[in-house]
Amino acid sequence: MIRIAMLGSGFIGRFYADSLQGYRNKDKIVSVYSRKEESAKKFAADYNCEHYTTNMEEAIAHANVDMVCISLPNNLHEEAVMLCCKHNKAVMTTKPLGRNAAEAYRMLQAVEEAGIFNGYLEDLVYTPKFLKAHESVKNGALGRILWAKSRETHPGPHSDWFWNIELAGGGCILDLGCHCVEITRSYIGKDILPTEVMCWADTQVKPIDAEDHAIALIKYETGAIAQFEVSWTFRGGLDLRDEVMGSEGTIWINNFLRTGFEMFTTGKGADYVSEKAESNTGWLFPVGDELNELGYNHMFMDMFNAYESNKAPKETFYDGYVVNAVLDAAYKSAKTKLWEPVHLDVWRGKTGLSKQSHLTEYDADHYLVKEEVTHYGAKKLILKNKKTGKIEERILE
Ligand SMILES: NC(=O)c1ccc[n+]([C@@H]2O[C@H](COP(=O)([O-])OP(=O)(O)OC[C@H]3O[C@@H](n4cnc5c(N)ncnc54)[C@H](O)[C@@H]3O)[C@@H](O)[C@H]2O)c1
């Protein structure tokens, strides 16, 4: 541990302090569980862990462990969560929480009954760009949120179990759609009820039982609509893009493939470029700091700060459960080709909302349709007469 005297506590002092304590922090992995002994041993050596094991319960029950971080295949999340409850250990689980809403609900009930800290590790609502964009949305810079879209596509995951529908619980809808649902839901408002889902899904390229490509629409009670596009068949790397549209503005975010860092190499000395990059020669789009750009730093900061102050983090098992419920409706809709309702056994947000008014007041007699300054310098107003319903045009010189 390095002990630092920070001289100055203003703007740059605080930047330095965030950086120093974020990257050289006091949190420590003390125990690691892995299926294979050699993997556990290597991880322990790489990260200087005092204990490694091939017995999951032993890692969780280890006396020095305060909090468990579940980074296991989807089919093992529930078993691991139940062991955390048994041993009264705080728990953070990677996405998706469950393979379906029933599994997620059992995990939610178990952690809440056990009274243990629970965090849902949805890193993409902690990326620097998301945090900034979300702040603007919350401050009203976009007005009333009408549409939020999230796209996550790549050439497919890296381990065998993802491609096994039984172990993974689904294909790209579950694996990638979980990110998109939580991103769009956060922009629309996590207290706004998602009501119905319409989804197209197909297996276009891969020799698997699950879907490798899907597009869906999610309706919310305010009338806002979310959209996701997910694929395990996309060529060209990891495409992470979000869009939010409101009555007063728009945000477009490209999180990964175009971050303002472009590079060409013939391949001499070529190495790792970024997650799921398909090439390390030619024109490349590296990512400067993946840990930060993917939200992991801000996510763990939120988790640990919340744990230490006995509060819930921004993302809890409840959020993971809502995400699973939305995705269950997407799977159903892909089969029935109908809008399918989202079934939530427990809803903690607002209720009884109705579609927000689309009418903008202009004056006592008119609604505003549009105003525009033309290329010839005239200010044009298009109005709707409240009484007659007639559309009128006015030109203000
Ligand atoms: N951005 C993200 O949030 C993100 C990214 C990738 C993966 N994930 C999630 O993390 C979890 C793990 O994914 P991963 O990519 O690390 O997988 P992985 O295959 O790379 O690692 C799985 C780990 O689980 C262990 N394991 C224990 N029992 C196992 C079993 N029966 N079969 C297979 N592995 C077993 C393995 O030893 C290995 O250490 C999944 O739930 C996945 O959805 C999240």
Image (cartoon, rainbow, N blue to C red):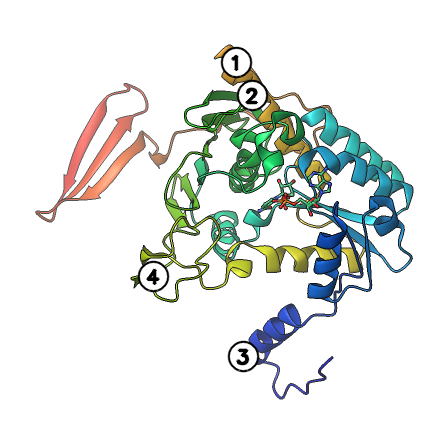
Q: In terms of depth relative to the viewer, which is nearer, 167 or 220?
A: 167
| Distance between mark 3 and mark 2 Cα atoms | 49 Å
Q: In terms of depth relative to the viewer, which is nearer, 27 or 268?
A: 268
Mark nearest the camera among 3 and 2 is 2
Label of residue 335 in the image: 1
- Provide residue 397's location: percent of width, then percent of height: 12, 46
> Amino acid under label 3?
Ile
Give the mark, 2 or 4, whose residue is nearer the N terminus.
4
Q: Residues within 10 Å of mark 3 (few under 14, many from 20)?
A: few
Q: Residues within 10 Å of mark 4 (few under 14, many from 20)?
A: few
Quadrant in which residue 326 is drawn: top right
Quadrant in which residue 296 is drawn: bottom right
The residue that appears at 46% across and 28% down in the rendered structure is 206
| Distance between mark 1 and mark 2 Cα atoms | 7 Å
Label of residue 331 in the image: 2
Give the mark, 3 or 1, whose residue is nearer the N terminus.
3
Q: Which residue is mark 4?
A: 267
Q: Are marks 3 and 4 in contact (CB under 8 Å)?
A: no
- Provide residue 20's location: percent of width, then percent of height: 62, 75
Q: Is residue 247 visible?
A: yes
Mark nearest the camera among 3 and 1 is 1
